[in-house]
Amino acid sequence: MDTIALILSIIGSLNWGLVGIFQFDLVAWIFGGQDAILSRIVYTLVGLAGLWCITLLFRKGQRIEGE
């Protein structure tokens, strides 16, 4: 779960970087606009992944199962 959350967070951060630098929303471009259902699903998954990654801050130094 941690790996998936990190990958989605990286995708989200790259997308926001493109928005900030070039005013280009890659997710919206790929999935048909910001209001498209697929774009909204991706935005929601990225947001949930970001929330999950907050837990990584509190687990620093602890052994994570599966690693």
Image (cartoon, rainbow, N blue to C red):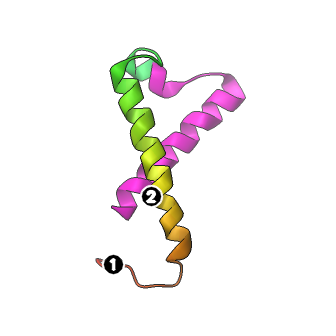
Q: Residue at x 48, y 43 (%)?
A: 47
Would residue 61 appear left or right of 21 to someone viewing this image?
Answer: left
Where is residue 62? Give x, y as percent.
46, 84
Span shown in magenta? 1-28
| Helix, strand or loop status at disc 2 | helix
Q: Amino acid at mark 2?
A: Trp
- Which disc number belongs to residue 67? 1
Q: Which residue is mark 2?
A: 52
* Residue 67 vs residue 1, the one in the foreground: 1
Would residue 37 appear left or right of 33 to someone viewing this image?
Answer: left
Q: Main secondary structure of the magenta part?
A: helix
| Helix, strand or loop status at disc 1 | loop
Where is residue 44? Give x, y as percent.
42, 37
Would residue 14 appear left or right of 36 to someone viewing this image?
Answer: right
Where is residue 34? Give x, y as percent.
48, 19
Q: Is 18 placed above or below 12 here?
A: above
Q: Is residue 11 magenta?
A: yes
